[in-house]
Image (tube, grey):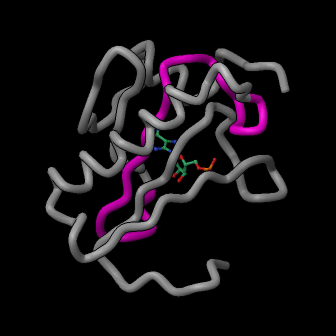
């Protein structure tokens, strides 16, 4: 799908909206979710304008791997890596995606049931 640069995460990347940043590098940022669904809930997003995971091509493989590694690194920094954390990527409205800038949810700090709702 086409990327809309007025989405809320694009505005956070442009520092037009505030966020509690946990990490930033050349390729991505991580910040706390404004409506946490677990005691620890943060998002890792690429700086590249990708609306959904399904819009990523093979050239995005290093970037997608980087997002996972940053998710784990930030989880370790926050001290939640050993007890367990879950990554979620909602792709498309039918899966619950509400912000159309690719993001990886990282949830931790409570028991996470399976299957997810
Ligand atoms: P999704 O439903 O997968 O698209 O997830 C979007 C997430 O972004 C939700 O968990 C929201 O709580 C979160 N969110 C929306 N606006 C903000 C914001 N301004 N700062 C941080 N998180 C946000």
Q: Quadrant of the N terminus?
A: top right
Residue 76 occupies which quadrant of the picture? bottom left
Which percent across, then down, holds residue 42? 37, 50
Label count reads 0
Magenta span of residues:
35-55
Is residue 80 in the magenta section? no
Give me the residue at 38% from left, 70% from top: 38
Q: Is residue 71 above or below residue 53?
A: below
In the rendered image, residue 51, in percent from the top left (x then y), is placed at 70, 29
Where residue 70 appears, x then y in whole percent?
33, 40
Camera-side residue of 17 and 100: 100
Would you say residue 43 sits in the magenta stretch?
yes
The picture places residue 48, in percent across and down from the top left corner, at 56, 17
Residue in the foreground of this view, choosing between 102 and 6: 102
Tell me the residue at 24%/77% (across/down): 83
Question: Is residue 57 left or right of 35 when viewed as pictured?
Answer: right
- For the point 30% across and 69% down, the residue is 39
| Whether residue 82 is situated above or below residue 90 in the rendered picture | below
Q: Nearer the viewer, residue 111 or 70?
A: 70
Quarter of the image holding residue 31?
top left
Residue 102: quadrant of the picture: top right
- Which residue is rendered at x = 30% and y = 63% of the image? 40
Q: Give the quarter of the figure containing the C terminus.
A: bottom right
Q: Is residue 15 left or right of residue 61?
A: left
| Above or below, 12 relative to 72 | above
């Amino acid at each position: 799908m086409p990327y809309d640069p007025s989405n809320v995460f694009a505005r956070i990347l442009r520092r037009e909206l505030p966020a509690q940043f946990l990490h930033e590098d050349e390729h991505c940022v991580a910040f706390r979710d404004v409506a946490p669904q677990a005691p620890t809930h943060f998002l890792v997003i690429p700086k590249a304008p990708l609306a959904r995971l399904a819009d990523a091509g093979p050239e995005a493989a290093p970037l997608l791997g980087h997002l996972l590694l940053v998710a784990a690194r930030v989880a370790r920094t926050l001290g939640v890596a050993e007890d367990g954390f879950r990554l979620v990527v909602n792709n498309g409205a039918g899966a619950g995606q509400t912000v159309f800038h690719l993001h990886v949810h990282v949830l931790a700090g409570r028991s996470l049931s399976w299957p997810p709702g």
